[in-house]
Amino acid sequence: AFARCGKLEQVAARSITTLGEYAFFHCDSLTNSAVLQNLTEVPAYAFAGTAVSHITLSDAVTAVGEGAFWGCGKLRAVKLGSVAVISEKAFYESALEAVSIPAQTESIGAYAFGRCTALTEFRTAEENDFYSAQDGVLFDTEGRVLVQYPLGKKAAQYTIPTGVSRVEAGAFSGSSLVRIELADSVAELGAGVFANSSALAEAALPGALTAIPWFFRGGPSAALAYWLSGI
């Protein structure tokens, strides 16, 4: 409806209950999010590329659509209310600094918080049955799947904990880590898991790993050292 209206700064229609996909796509000057107050779902790419700086979702919102806030370079804070579904790339390349996953969240899509380089930690509600946070890193509740590493976390190296069997797609993409060590339990890596990690110099991969997807593309130089045990 208003896609690419570059001079649109404010939307005062607080009574809106439904938006279409791409409703405010790349409205580069749009700074307010009042229109979100009565929605039950934030549709795909509805606010992608806007200038919103903070978002509060009401408890009525059950889902955040694919790429809904993709590329919101000024979006530093979000309150997720009672959202159940956070779709693929929902907050991709936003400026979020910390994310609290509510108790009701049961599904987080690939790259939902990917390439958020200011993000320092994830927190999860104790009542959440699907996700947990360990030292600011997002896992499934059983600690078997590493969902997303917070790219703004100040550390030179990280060891994936024992018990993790899968690392999701793009989980470390764009990180500033110099060394990553995978636990012996890791058997599966998602696509692009370490892509665009230009500082990465060492990756210690376990013998349980049976396949290596494209996960270093666009990242480390030829100086990258691989420690492979049993592959």
Image: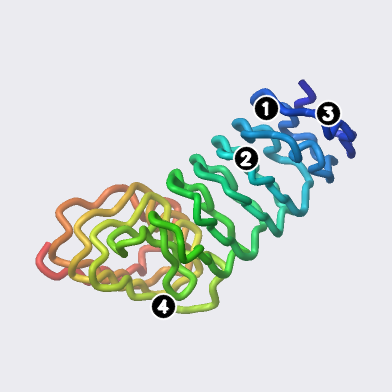
Q: Give the structural element (helix, strand or loop) at label 3.
A: loop
Q: Label 4, on which residue?
A: 157
Q: Residues within 10 Å of mark 4 (few under 14, many from 20)?
A: some
Q: Label 2, on which residue?
A: 61
Residue found at the very far left of the displayed protein: 230
Sequence-earlier tag: 3 or 1: 3
Viewer-nearest of discs 2 and 4: 2
- The reply to whether discs 1 and 4 touch (Cβ–Cβ < 8 Å) is no
- The reply to whether discs 2 and 4 touch (Cβ–Cβ < 8 Å) is no
Q: From the top left corner, tell me how far across and down residue 179 is, in percent.
A: 38, 74
Spatial separation of the CA atoms under disc 3 and disc 1:
12 Å
Sequence-earlier tag: 2 or 4: 2
The N terminus sits in image quarter: top right
From the viewer's perspective, is 53 left or right of 103?
right
Sequence-earlier tag: 2 or 3: 3
Q: Give the structural element (helix, strand or loop) at label 4.
A: strand
* The one of 146 and 12 positioned closer to us in this rendering: 12
Sequence-earlier tag: 2 or 1: 1
- Labelled disc at residue 147: none
Question: Looking at the picture, which amino acid does disc 4 mark?
Answer: Gln
* The one of 91 and 85 positioned closer to us in this rendering: 85
Q: Label 1, on which residue?
A: 22
Question: Looking at the picture, which amino acid does disc 3 mark?
Answer: Cys
Spatial separation of the CA atoms under disc 3 and disc 4:
43 Å
Instruction: Give the quarter of the image for residue 37.
Output: top right
Viewer-nearest of discs 1 and 4: 1
Q: Residues within 10 Å of mark 1 (few under 14, many from 20)?
A: many
Sequence-earlier tag: 3 or 4: 3
- Labelled disc at residue 5: 3
Viewer-nearest of discs 2 and 3: 2
